[in-house]
Every structure is written in C-alpha cells, then in structure tokens.
Image: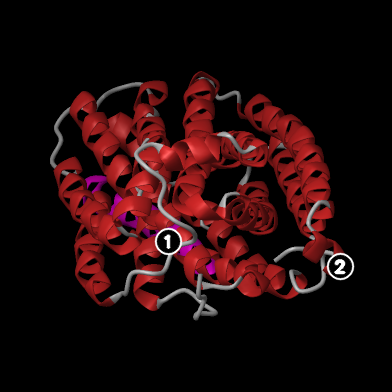
Amino acid sequence: MSATLDRPPRSLAAASFVSCFDRFAVTPMLVLIAVDLDVPLATAVAVASGYYLAYGLVQPLWGVLSDRFGRVRVMRAALLGAAVTGLVSALMPVLGALVVSRVAAGACFGAVVPTSLTYVGDTVQQSVRQRALSDLMGVMSLGTALATGFGGLLGDLAGWRPVFVVPAVCALACAVALRALPEPPRSGPAPGRGGHVGTVLRSPWALLVFALAFVEGAVLIGTMAFLATALQHHGVSTTVAGLCAAAYGLGVWLFTRLVKRLSRGWPAWWLIAAGGAQMCAGYVVVAAGVSVVTVTVTALLLGGGWSFMHSSLQTWVTSVVPQARGTAVAFFASALFVGSAASSWAAGPLAGDGSYGLLFGLAAAAALPLTVVAALTRRRYGALLPAEGARGHAQ
C-alpha cells in the first residue's frame, strides 16, 4: 500500500461532520418528539435506539461493499440514501413511521464514518495515523457540538422536524463533493466471496477490539444520549439542555488536539487508561446530581474519554487485519453502535422514571472494567509487535 496523505481530505471530513450531526441531533429532540406525538418518553427513545441499531447492524455490509467496490463509491451512494430518508423523516406523522424512517436514515448514514476511517487507514502511514484520525475526530466533534447545541435551539424555535432536514440537505451536497475524491489503494489481494468477513472473524485480536467497542458504545454513546433529557426532566429548556450536552463536542475537539501531541510519545494503552478515567469521573459527577453545571462537566469529560480511548481503539482496529481493513473497521463500528442501541433501549425505562442517578451510576461502574481490560490487552498487543516494542507505542 502506498500512503501519500498526512490528514483527511476536506470532502471526507465534511461528510463525517454531517454524519455525526445527524446522529447526535436527535438527543435533545426526544422530549419534543414525545410531546408532539403524544407518546411516553420511554417509547420515543426508540427514535434514537432504532437509529443506533440500524447504524451498527449495517456496518459489516458497508465494509464488505467498500472492500469490493471502493470507499468513495460506497460513501456517495450511502449519502444519497441518507438525504432521501432524512427528508422523509421530517414528514412522518406518527411515531411508528418516524422510527422506520430514522432506522433507514441510520442505515445510510452508517456507511460514512467507518468508511472515512478506512480511507484514512488506506492512505495515511501507520506512524502518523492516530494524528490523522484525531484530526478527523476533531471535525466530527464539531458536528456533534453543533447537533446538540444548534439542534436544541432550532427545536425550541421551529420544532423537531426541521432538525432532520438540515443534515439531509448537507448529505446531498457531500455526495456531490465526493465525486472529486480518488479511490485509495488497498492492502493485499481481494479474497473471494465472503473472504473478507472470514478473514476478520478468524482474528482473535479483531474479535477482542469488537467486544471492547460494544461495551464502549453502551457506556458512552448510549448513556450519553440521556444527558440532555435528564436536564429537561428537571425543567431546563431544550435549548439550554442541548447547549450543555454540546460541551461533549467541545471536549472532543479540545482533547483531540492534546491526543494528537501525546500520541507521539505516550503508549497507546496509556491513552486508553486516561480516556477511561475521564469517562468514569464524568458519570460519577452527574450521578451525584443532575444540574446545568454537572451535565456540562460530564459532557466535557466524556469528550475527553472519547478522544483518548476511542481514537486509540480506532487506530488499533485499522491495523489488526490490514488486508480486509474496510470490513474490520465496519465490524468495529457495528459493535460500537449495537452496544449504544442496546444501552439506550435498556436505559429508557430508567429515564422515563427519572432515575438518572442510577442510570449514570451504572455507566460509571461499567466504565471501570472496560478501561482496565482495554488498557491491559492493548499493552499486550503492543508487546507482540517488534516495531511498536522498539518505539514504546503504536500510532
């Protein structure tokens, strides 16, 4: 493979930005949707959990397709589908139809971020790959911050429907812009039909990283979706709740700058440990009491946890099966979002009852073993690589 880039192309970063915007825009909308469609909050959560589940389950399919037909071609087709399903979502009159349309949107937007990560893996050399992925995560964090902040404001001013229109229109623009992006070279010969999946699933290290991603998705993404609803449950407006949750995106943006510097000298398992510690601390803070201050602090700390831990896991998965990188990254993303869907569904009744202290306390408890296992196994993986052992870390 010939790596020629040191940072993600702008059109690729823009597509990832839009995908993250769409994924997180629903967070401050759940209460508004429940009120407008006259359903309980625990039922309206299906709008988010259904999206996450579809987003995760289609990843292996997108990964196989990108390995066989090309990264850019798959992203453009998925973005066109996302534009259509996003616009349809804004027109749905009842919850069932809305959930179906959001499931379809999640399935389409689900191709963008993992395929973007794979593109970086294909085109950026290993020695600087984590820094390039940190750049991409920084852009995605802005999408996350704007989704929760702008989404909450737009929801208060115009309702939840226009919030789904904005990323749909942007997805269409990105599909057009990606026409100029060249297809990257890929590692190794293409296996026969089903060969990519088999190669990935026979790798013990790949299976381990997928399991870690599942737990990380459950602890971080699935539970974090309730930060804004916890504030709304305490009488805070949708705008303010969205802005507080938007601190997560700010945290990701700030901490990815730091990770980019630290990754040059810190072992990857140290970065994972630092990220897990921030996740644990964040959930402990908000479990002790829900307020504008505690939610904002927690959102910032979760942004740090994502920047340190998730970027390290992402970099790890791009190297475990390089000859089927697209499929490996897709399974990784699938595990991440299936985990988030499972936890958001399971947490719905607790949120509906207002038991946010218990909800966030359970997340803090789950973050601790995740951190220990991820850090120790990443250290073991690094020790098995001669080049990494000589340098003390892997990018």
Residue 35 location in percent, x, y?
30, 31
Residue 99 included in the magenta stretch of the image: no
Depicted 8 relative to depicted 156: above or below = below
Local crowd at mark 1 within 10 Å, few (<14), some, or many (≥20)? Answer: many
User: On residue 116, which mark appears?
Assistant: 1
Relative to the observer, which residue lies in front, 390 or 314? 390
Q: What range is drawn magenta here?
A: 138-162
As drawn, is 268 to the left or to the right of 87? right
- In terms of secondary structure, where does tag 2 sit? helix
Classify mark 1: helix, strand or loop. Answer: helix
Q: Tell me, yes or no, whether the highlighted magenta stretch contains residue 151.
A: yes
Q: Position of residue 116 (x, y in %)?
A: 42, 61
> Percent from the top left, x then y, of residue 374?
75, 42
Task: Tell me where residue 318 sits by quadrant.
Answer: bottom right
Name the residue: 60% across, 62% down: 252
Q: Quadrant of the C terminus?
A: bottom right
Q: Nearer the viewer, residue 281 or 80?
A: 80
Q: Earlier in the sequence, mark 1 or mark 2?
A: 1
| Residue indicated by mark 2 | 390
